[in-house]
Image (cartoon, helix red, strand yellow):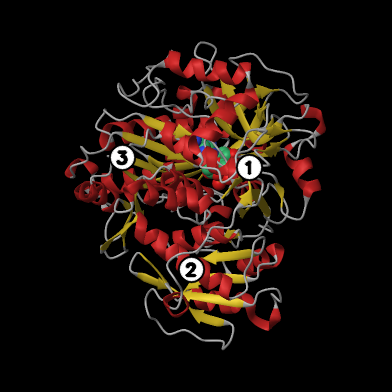
Amino acid sequence: MSTLFPPLTQARIQGMAAYQALCDEAERDYAGYWARLGREYISWKQPFTKSLDDSQAPFFKWFEDGLLNVSYNCLDRHVEAGRGDRTAIIFETDDGQVRNTSYSQLLALTCRLANALKAKGVKKGDRVVIYMPMSVEGVAAMQACARIGATHSVVFGGFSAQSLRDRIQDAGAVALITADEQLRGGKALPLKAIVDDALADGACPTLKDVIVYKRTGGAINWTAHRDHWLHELTEQQPETCEPEWVDAEHPLFLLYTSGSTGKPKGVQHSSGGYLLHAALTTSWTFDLQDSDVFWCTADIGWVTGHSYIAYGPLALGGTELVFEGVPTYPDAGRFWQMIQKHKVTVFYTAPTAIRSLIKAAETTPAVHPKNYDLSSLRILGSVGEPINPAAWLWYYENVGGSRCPIMDTWWQTETGGHMITPLPGVTPQLPGSCTLPFPGIQAAIVDETGHDVPNGQGGILVVKKPWPSMIRTIWGDPERYKKSYFPEELKGYYLAGDGASRAADTGYFTITGRIDDVLNVSGHRMGTMEIESALVSHTELVAEAAVVGRPDDLTGEAICAFVVLKRSRPTGDEAKAIANELRNWVAKEIGPIAKPKEIRFGDNLPKTRSGKIMRRLLRSLAKGEAVTQDTSTLENPAILDQLAKAN
Ligand code: 6R9
């Protein structure tokens, strides 16, 4: 067994026995376990009498006859408890200005905005699209929708006019909240102009009102009667607004996410079950305490920004940092400088950010984390993709000072919150493994027929029982929901779409990548992630790597690797020599069977704006096909031409 790294000595859940006791409680009385937590973590206007209703499976209901309001839970109840002066949000702008917002102030802003929406005729059940920069107003916009029972759909500020239009149309949104411009890395991005584009030519007939937050004051076009300044609407409104009490199943939000094929799916989440898991996981996974300063670097346009910025930390009355900018501006030391400045204690980011900051620190020593005082940190987190052991170790040693456990949280837009993750105070960590299921979550690994596979072998990652924060349906397409997530051959288990294995000794889970990314080379089953991790562990040469399969006459599938080196991109004989060295390296790390048949070098990899490598595009390139897929979510489309050719 590889080295295990110790958990925290002091945390809310103390020791493996306490973890096991929670798992046992869930095992004994599943509905009762979640009912207990639902009562502990949520303030109900009217208590629920039943926790799980599975009579319409796979359309599950949780706490259905309970009445609550999500924004009441995130704001009012802390103010009522005399904690209104506590800082809810420390906001830092792109250019380093800081503004603190207390719970009382956030409540007042939320109420004004909620009243403004009501004044425009927005009511319970209506959909409101939010296309906002990272801001206090962005969080307040989400809370304001929750307050009046409107269902929000946040669209990431980097999406194109076309993507925005598709989402407004699919959701049938009646109102949209945006900003004049978004400021990131010193550059202004014209959000309002993109909105104008999306709405042009009457493309979105359901949408009546556009509310504009003035961020930069840059010039924008104005459509009379449709467009309104946020500050003008809200300054006329009172600071109080009676919450709309909704039943627990009332849709809190839709969040569009790409499926493996077809158009983006509007993942629908509930109010009660979702909020419970957002709060519970923030409490248990991050051990959030009153003394903590929590920082999740995600954007509110992604699910991580929903659960771990807009809802979870606020439901607990925590203090969090919200950041407008990017990790590399004004230089790649920005994250470390901000942790030092705000004395951040819990830091949650993505492997792709870590890998790029490793590369930056190696080329520019001044931005290495060792130049900053990071001693306030006590817990680190990782999310979004598997974190390769080399990046894990760097994060552990250089950011966490070999002192802070790393919560490698596996979950998805569809799951609402953490599903498999270490817990501080409980789980010895293993670099590259998301370790064990969150207490109560029935994660398992099965074969194509839904039968359990023994530990030590790989298979399909499923969740055997419904859980409170699970996706409720795909907006407007319940059939697609059933087909995508509950295929008949899997006995009613939730299909995550990822492959995974469990260690024979510890039972720890390791995610091997999306199921369609698992390769079969000469009858050997291999995760593309495993090979990527081997490549990246060549820390001297490799900055980043993505591996895909392509059909091969001899071996079934062949491995093709796309590699970004730490030095400039090689060509000709030099490229051949380095490719050879890397092939031998992989052979040494995993075995000759894992040797990439081809290695292509690029200055970068094709990534979505949230930083995920778009492997489906790489698969087309590896096969020598023209890219016909939608590339609208791509951060850097020009890279495709470079990677299309062999070195
Ligand atoms: C939260 C989020 C979900 C997909 C998921 C998996 C990958 C996320 C991971 C991870 C390995 C982790 N993923 N966390 N893989 N280890 N800790 O990212 O949601 O954008 O819907 O992506 O991301 O492949 O299926 P989403």
Report the residue marked by disc 3: 290
Residue 198 at x, y percent in the picture: 62, 74
* Whether residue 193 can be seen here: yes
Q: Amino acid at mark 1?
A: Gly
Q: Is residue 200 left or right of residue 507?
A: right
Report helix, strand or loop for mark 2: helix
Pick the front one: 450 or 378: 378
Q: Is residue 144 positioned above or below 181 on the image?
A: above
- The number of numbered badges drawn on the structure is 3
Pick the front one: 627 or 296: 296
Q: Residues within 10 Å of mark 2 (few under 14, many from 20)?
A: many
Mark 1 and mark 3 lie on one chain; the one further toward the N terminus is 1
Q: Residue furthest bottom?
A: 224
Q: Is residue 523 left or right of residue 55?
A: left
Q: Amino acid at mark 3?
A: Asp
| Residue depicted at x 55% and y 37% | 411
Foreground mark, 1 or 3, reads: 1
Quarter where residue 554 is shown: top right
Report the residue marked by disc 1: 66
Kindly report the distance in space between the C-alpha atoms of the residues bearing marks 1 and 3.
Answer: 28 Å
Residue 604 at x, y percent in the picture: 45, 52
| Residue depicted at x 52% and y 78% | 193
| Residue depicted at x 64% and y 61% | 124
| Residue depicted at x 51% and y 10% | 505
Residue 17 at x, y percent in the picture: 44, 13
Report the residue marked by disc 2: 113
Mark 2 and mark 3 lie on one chain; the one further toward the N terminus is 2
Mark 2 and mark 1 lie on one chain; the one further toward the N terminus is 1
Quarter where residue 9 is shown: top left
Report helix, strand or loop for mark 1: loop
